[in-house]
Amino acid sequence: MDDDDDADAAATLVKQAFGESSDEEGGQLGGLEAPEGSERERLPHRSTPRRSPTWAPIEEIDGLWLCGDFLSPEQQHSLLSAVEEEGWFIEASHNQAMRFGSLPAWATGLSNSIREAVLLGDLVPGFELSNADAYEDSSLFPILPFELLGREPLFDQLIVNLYQPGEGICAHVDLMRFGDGIAIVSLESPCIMHFTQVEDMRIGSKGENGRQPMSKVPVYLAPGSLVIMSGDARYRWKHEINRKPGFQVWQGQELDQKRRISITLRKLSIAE
Ligand SMILES: O=C(O)CCC(=O)C(=O)O
Ligand SMILES: [Fe+2]
């Protein structure tokens, strides 16, 4: 596909997923409605278009993108309410819920919003100038390759994790039963997710791209942020969250740990 074909395919995808114009139901971030009685709900439907979210590449890791302003505070609130209404975490001993196949409506709305943010979001200023070469073949869709962005459904597996202060997740690469292209939305507490290369990229050896492997790459996940992992980021880097004292340090400050909820969306691999 050349760039024009890609652009046409993207336009078709936007129309299919979100309707002809952004005023229609299901338009930009339309899958997430404001809570009843909120200021936004009283406004005429979508009278003020929401600004585009901004995407920043994590420069050390190919295929890792962060959208720090994916969800507004209102949208975070309504997403959290939708999760809480599922009743998964009423018992203190329950801290994880999984769904396969058909997802709750709010998760399908979230999935649509992710696709829309990838298609319509802005790249952080300066990105195109400094990184144009590395992304030559995917300049239209640097955040998620078009074959992943255009698949239907985009995601068919949901996992919601609830972490109390001090709790996290050990370094891992997600199971191979899940395909490429993984999205993680963070709610409530900010946290630092650390990425480390898998063993075949040992310290001291040079990776395929000629770069020296990095020891550990910290990524700050604000509430309402969205992370997308594909390619190397998904297969060649482990991710972990260590919320023990001393590990959640950002710009010299230890983060204040509260409860954190994360929503991970993935697509099951097609069975061979
Ligand atoms: O909670 C998170 O942000 C990450 C969750 C995760 O990596 C997973 O469920 O595989
Ligand atoms: Fe994971």
Image: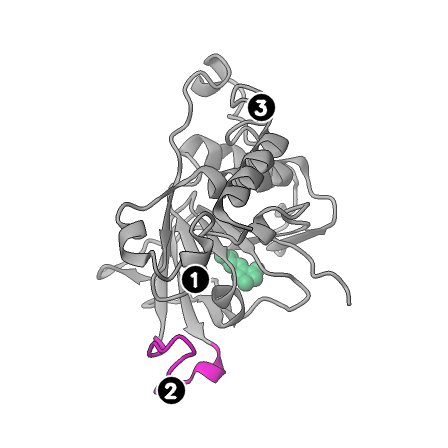
Any part of residue 38 in sight? no
Main secondary structure found in the magenta portion: loop
Q: Amino acid at mark 1?
A: Gly
Give the extent of the magenta segment. 198-214
The residue positioned 63% from the left and 45% from the top of the image is 90
Give the labeled residue for mark 3.
Answer: 20
User: Which mark sits nearer the N-terminus, 2 or 3?
Assistant: 3
SS for dot 1: loop
Front: mark 2 or 1: 2
Give the labeled residue for mark 1.
Answer: 166
Image quarter in which the C terminus is found: bottom right
Q: Find residue 242 and report its image quarter.
A: bottom left
Q: Amino acid at mark 3?
A: Glu
Viewer-side residue, 157 vs 81: 157
SS for dot 2: loop
Front: mark 1 or 3: 3
Ligand 2 positioned in quadrant: bottom right
Residue 21 higher or lower than 180, as above or below: above
Q: Which mark is residue 70?
A: none
Residue 35 higher or lower than 162, as above or below: above
Residue 179 sits inside the magenta stretch: no
Q: Find residue 130 and report its image quarter.
A: bottom left
Give the labeled residue for mark 2.
Answer: 205
The residue positioned 38% from the left and 48% from the top of the image is 222
Viewer-side residue, 35 vs 118: 118
Coordinates of residue 214 in the picture (x, y in percent): 34, 75
- Mark 3 crowd level (few <14, some 14–19, many ≥20, 10 Å Cα): few
